[in-house]
Image (cartoon, rainbow, N blue to C red):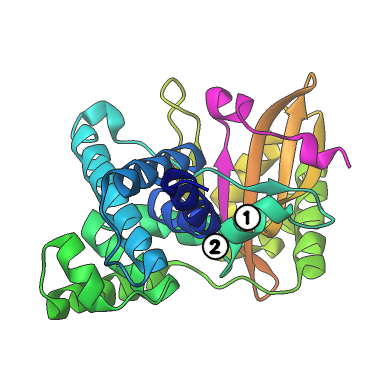
Amino acid sequence: MDENEFLARRFEAHRTHLRAVAYRMLGSVSEADDAVQEAWFKLHRSDTREVENLAGWLTTVVGRVCLDMLRSRAARREDPLEERVRLPDPIISGVDGVDPEQEALLADSVGLALLVVLESLAPAERLAFVLHDLFAVPFEEIAPVVGRTPAAARQLASRARRRVHGAAPVPDPDISKQREVVDAFLAAARDGDFDALVALLDPDVVVRSDGGALRPGGVVRGAAAVAGGAIFAAQFAEVSRPALVNGAAGVVATAEGRPLSVMAFTITNGRIVSLAILNDPERLDRLDLTVLDG
């Protein structure tokens, strides 16, 4: 085995972990794969003979690549046309369970509600929180990535943690109970039963929809507004297929055999507290929905 092949094998042993880091940082599966590939290029160009912990070294490299990508994304969003809701990429699985290849991406209950909150963080805050709180990277290793002291990196993570804990609801753990609530919601929407919908919704429920650049989505708050919108939207879906979306109960709605939307529910104490709806045609066409055919 030559040196390049040995290095490639060592990298492949860490690829799954690195994809999980990048997905939490970027909320995009394709961008996560790009970040991991860039980490491979950096490894191939670097002298790592003195690196004792290759996994840690690669994790910080991926973190630095993702930080640059987040900063570039933030700079582009200075354009007013970019001021819209953009949901993270959903990870869709059949109701029987998560595909083994997706399992690492969804460890630690990385639901869309958490990723949505992470999208609101400043890039350095997101990196400090993800690396430290989700992957236990010491602040001494995070500090040079963000160009701060370890104490300042700790403050970044602390600030992010307060935002996350205040805005990312903790879902009920029982998937079967989640599914009961989602099924009742869909039935009430189809029947036009406004009161039944309101009873299933938290009074402060928040719905975020992402229809893409040509059909900007938005945010709807409050049980009455969300119930009314659900009754209206139910007219357009021919089939609503149950799914797991980022490990939680969700729905893929289709019309004329094509995906119309992906809905990710966050259910706390038996009520829907948040709903993320991806109905961007371009992004929906890229999803692999064959996992629902099993």
Residue 11 versus residue 176: which sits nearer the camera?
A: 11
Tell me if label 2 and label 1 are in contact, CB under 8 Å.
yes
Q: Is residue 275 above or below residue 199?
A: above
Q: Which residue is mark 1?
A: 246
Q: Earlier in the sequence, mark 2 or mark 1?
A: 2
For the point 54% across and 23% down, which residue is it? 282
Reply above or below: 18 against 252: below
Q: What's the residue at 33%, 49% (across, down)?
A: 43
Which span is picked out in magenta? 274-294
How far, Cα to Cα, is label 2 from label 1?
7 Å
Q: Which residue is mark 2?
A: 110
Disc 1, SS: loop
Residue lying farthest to the right in this orientation: 294
Instruction: Please say whether residue 267 is visible from this viewpoint.
Output: yes
Residue 116 x %, y %? 44, 54
Q: Amino acid at mark 1?
A: Asn
Whether 207 is drawn above or below 111: the answer is above
Taking the image as shown, residue 54 lies to the left or right of residue 12, namely left
Q: Position of residue 133 (x, y in %)?
A: 39, 75
Give how far across and how far down residue 192 sits, in percent: 77, 42
Number of numbered callouts drawn: 2
Quarter of the image where one finds residue 136: bottom left
**Magenta residue check for 246:** no
Point 57% across, 23% down: residue: 281
- The residue positioned 34% from the left and 53% from the top of the image is 62
Furthest residue toward front: 1
- Residue 185 locus on image (x, y percent): 75, 53
Does dot 2 land on a helix, a strand or a loop? loop
In front of the other: 244 or 239 = 244
Q: Left of 12 or right of it: where is 233? A: right
